[in-house]
Image (spheres, rainbow, N blue to C red):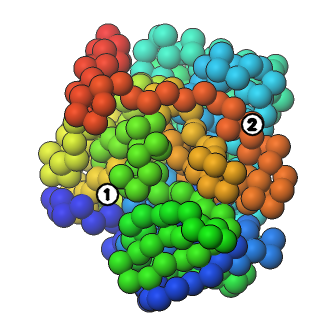
Amino acid sequence: MIADNTPWYAMERAAPMPAPPLEGEAMADVCIVGGGIAGCSAALHLAELGHRVVLLEAGRVGSAASGRNGGQLIPGTAASQDALEALVGPADARRVWDCTVEALALLRERVARHGIDCDLVPGHLQVALRPRHDDELRSWHDALQARYAYPHTQLLAREALPAFVGSERYCSGLFDANGGHLQPLEYVRGLARAAQAAGARIHENSRAVDWSREAGGLVVRTASGCVRARQLLLAGNALLGGFEPALARRILGVGTYVVATEPLGRERAEALLPANAAVSDCNWILDYFRRSADHRLLFGGRVSYSGLDPSAGAAATRRRMLRVFPQLAEARVTQAWGGWLDITRNRAPDFGRLAGDVYYLQGFSGHGVALAGMAGKLVAEAISGTAGRFDVFARIPHRAFPGGALLRRPALVLAMLWYRLRDLL
């Protein structure tokens, strides 16, 4: 098994030529820090609205969470709608939900309009492992129909599951025809190309090291240059590190892992997932999996709150895969990788302003493939003077993780032990 932490996505297709690093001084209306889905989406929308945009990416576009994830497309946020209602009230919780549904439509429209070849496939299935999950799925299905006017879901009893997943592990499911899956690295690369075509300047291998206010605006510095801008968007999520301490305290990076099997052949891959839907289970620390276009199984299913160890994570993820699909015992895992996922304490996304001219997008908590693209659109609207929808998200309250820089990760590890025991019991 290969466990060099290189995603299968990066091996599947040749990388584009890198955009040049920033050299010297650049002028912009908006400087964006972070070349993931959120940053590239914002760059595209801002450029289309006529803004001069300069985007700084520390490595390559999509090289962090945006290009290393499981590629699943799901409405909603990692926080439940009930949790959001408790945080912001029913009206704003509904507005958040509507934005996440629009995010799926926006993604499909972009893929079609910009010709992004990212293996987009419809259909997502959430599966239950025990009777309490059956009740949760039924309750959520009923709420979607009655409260959210969302007609895309279908409850599946155990006997209906073989048409979707070739495993005996699950007892029921909720199929969402409006969800789906894609190849995430090619999607974010496609957004970057579209943003460049619209006039945005992208500089790769250009880590932003600090920012300050000077006469006439903001200055963002790299090792070899600087950007002078009227407004700044921070979209680096967990990898911003100490660049902006006020934001770093509100998210925590957790390690997550994915493995890819060898090509299984069409017949064998279709037997595992006959409907070619993406699948995730109902556990707090969940398994998720899907087929690739070349008939591999891509399986993610473990998080590390104490650190990132791709080798150990790969072995544990493979064991979880075999609990779902024991028929893959002889199949080789040819690629395994891990990466950092940014989470918030309440698992709701964290969008807002540090000041009137400094915006940020972070805390997608595992639901960022579709929502991060929508976040880029919302922040572009806000920067352009129409902030209503962005401010719905900005009203979600967030607190720093307890324990300070030294103790907050151990505190989270202890808290997560409870949720792991809950999953097991």
Q: Residue at x 15, y 45 (%)?
A: 312
* As drawn, 91 above or below 152: above
Residue 308: x %, y % from top left: 22, 47
Residue 386: x %, y % from top left: 84, 52
Marks 1/2 in contact by CB < 8 Å: the verdict is no
In front of the other: 345 or 266:
345
Q: Dot 2 surroundings within 10 Å: few (below 14), some, or many (20 or more)?
A: some
Q: Residue at x 47, y 57 (%)?
A: 236
Q: Dot 1 surroundings within 10 Å: few (below 14), some, or many (20 or more)?
A: many
Would you identify the image quadrant in which residue 130 lies?
A: top left
Q: In the rendered view, does 34 fall on the left or right side of 392?
A: left
Q: Quadrant of the C terminus?
A: top left
Q: Quadrant of the N terminus?
A: bottom left
Nearer to us: label 1 or label 2: 2
Inspect the image, locate mark 1, and give the three-letter code of the amino acid beneath it: Ala
Q: Residue at x 61, y 62 (%)?
A: 232
Q: Sequence order check: which comes first, mark 1 or mark 2?
A: 1
Residue 156 in sight in this render: no
| Label ID, residue 260 | 1
Q: In the rendered view, does 349 fall on the left or right side of 337?
A: right
| Label ID, residue 392 | 2
Q: Residue at x 18, y 59 (%)?
A: 3
Residue 419: x %, y % from top left: 35, 18
